[in-house]
Image: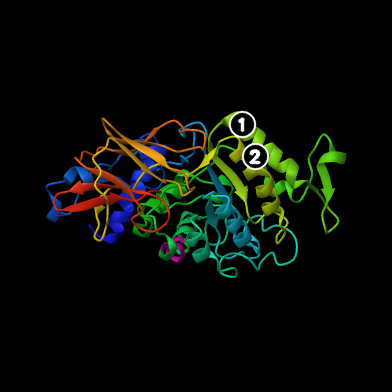
């Protein structure tokens, strides 16, 4: 398989979990087959089959976290980077929280949607705030949020393709875990957009669009105040306007998360008040409360990439049915157990283990290990494969 096709299969594996085995949106029909030189272990490299969700490839379905186990959250931050994104990422890393940043390259007047308020509105984005390498080194994930933050249901399909493909080309050199993903600004997505992107081979295997399960409007809260108790919940901004106190925004998110119990959480590191530290204030008020309640943090998908042969992998002997390793980079030992159709894994909460979920399907091997293959601080799944080792990277 080529490097590109490997990435495509990896993305299909990630998408299959949240879509219940169905590949949605811009993933194309097809099968993945193993390298000819390893024909004796085809089950390792063809475990995931691309299955369209419907008979029509044009599909406007968006992925969410409804199938997450209770207690598992994917914290995602959109619209960055802003001037304080690196400080936010460093804070999250100190708290052992791995996040996903859906990033924009550049904000352009009369093109970008909802550019926000304040000075320097068109002076952020990773073209002007080059922190992508820093985010990845801190253990976070990158996602495509279009080149210029364009609402994709309001432009021609060819423009949709251009916004996503140009941004993905810039992001690919920084993606180390074989998971390429995107979110449409504002969740604006159509069947026509999906069809146009599906025709672009440069985007084959990009998973998305990702929607969300929890959103308490931190972006809007930063530039206005909707409250039944404005005297206690609102405050003046440094520019004389009103906003919801960051503490109150965090409380609203916490209440919605407690109701949902799991899923993908939508936040913004470039809030409406561009250049402010509002996103950091919200995070500092929210994250400790989530950790105190035993929530654990993961990628928007829970799935290893398909296994493929890798050189230079050093694994201690392990024949046990239960494997231990840090799957999400939070410093706690998670567990993976053999099940009939592969491996089911459970994230550690500090008070025990969350409910187990199948992270790898269709794999049969006599020996297996968890080992950090690509140095991102997360344990990957490796199995004995003939004379070598085949591994699938953690998301």
Residue 390 disc label: none
> Which residue appears at 39% of the width and 33% of the height?
357
Depth check: give the residue in front, 24 or 103: 103
Question: SS at mark 2?
Answer: helix
> Which residue appears at 55% of the width and 54% of the height?
93
Residue 170 part of the magenta segment: yes
Q: Quadrant of the N terminus?
A: bottom left
- Give the alpha-carbon distance from disc 2 to disc 1, as whole Å: 11 Å
Q: Give above or below for 19 relative to 314.
A: above
Question: What segment carries the magenta color?
Answer: 168-172
Give the percent coordinates (x, y) of residue 154.
56, 51
Residue 258 disc label: 1
Give the percent coordinates (x, y) of residue 201.
34, 58
Residue 373 part of the magenta segment: no
Label whose residue precedes the other's in the sequence (2 or 1): 1
Mark 2 sits on what residue? 289
Question: SS at mark 1?
Answer: helix
Q: Give above or below for 101 relative to 332.
A: below
Asked whether the viewer can see residue 45, the reply is no
* Circle 1 Cα neighbour tier, 10 Å, few/some/many (<14 / 14–19 / ≥20): some
Residue 15 placement: quadrant: top left
């Amino acid at each position: 398989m080529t490097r590109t096709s490997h990435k495509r299969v990896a993305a299909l594996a990630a998408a299959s979990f949240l879509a219940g085995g169905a590949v949605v949106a811009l993933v194309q029909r097809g099968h993945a087959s193993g390298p000819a030189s390893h024909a004796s272990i085809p089950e390792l490299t063809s475990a995931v089959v691309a299955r369209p969700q419907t008979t029509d490839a044009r599909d406007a379905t968006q992925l969410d976290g409804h199938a997450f186990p209770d207690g598992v959250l994917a914290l995602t931050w959109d619209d960055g980077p802003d001037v304080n994104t690196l400080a936010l990422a460093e804070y999250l890393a100190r708290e052992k929280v791995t996040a996903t940043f859906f990033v924009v390259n550049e904000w352009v007047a009369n093109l970008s949607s909802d550019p926000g308020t304040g000075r320097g509105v068109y002076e952020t984005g990773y073209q002007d705030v080059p922190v992508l390498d820093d985010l990845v080194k801190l253990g976070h994930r990158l996602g495509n949020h279009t080149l210029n933050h364009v609402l994709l249901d309001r432009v021609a399909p060819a423009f949709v393709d251009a916004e996503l493909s140009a941004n993905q080309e810039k992001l690919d050199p920084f993606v180390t875990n074989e998971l390429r993903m995107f979110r449409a600004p504002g969740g604006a997505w159509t069947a026509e957009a999906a069809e146009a992107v599906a025709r672009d081979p440069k985007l084959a295997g990009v998973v998305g669009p990702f929607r969300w399960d929890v959103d308490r409007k931190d972006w809007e809260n930063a530039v206005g105040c909707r409250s039944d108790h404005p005297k206690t919940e609102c405050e003046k901004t440094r520019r004389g306007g009103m906003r919801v106190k960051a503490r109150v925004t965090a409380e609203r998110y916490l209440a919605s998360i407690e109701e949902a119990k799991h899923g993908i959480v939508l936040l913004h590191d470039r809030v409406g008040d561009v250049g402010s530290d509002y996103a950091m204030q919200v995070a500092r008020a929210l994250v400790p409360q989530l950790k105190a309640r035993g929530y654990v943090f993961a990628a928007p998908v829970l799935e290893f990439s398909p296994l493929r042969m890798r050189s230079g992998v050093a694994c201690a002997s392990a024949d046990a049915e239960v494997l231990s390793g840090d799957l999400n980079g939070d410093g706690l030992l998670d567990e993976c157990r053999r099940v009939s159709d592969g491996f089911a894994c459970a994230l550690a909460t500090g008070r025990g283990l969350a409910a187990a979920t199948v992270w790898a399907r269709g794999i049969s091997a006599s020996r297996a290990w968890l080992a950090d293959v690509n140095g991102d601080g997360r344990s990957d799944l490796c199995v004995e494969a003939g004379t070598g080792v085949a591994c699938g990277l953690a998301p």
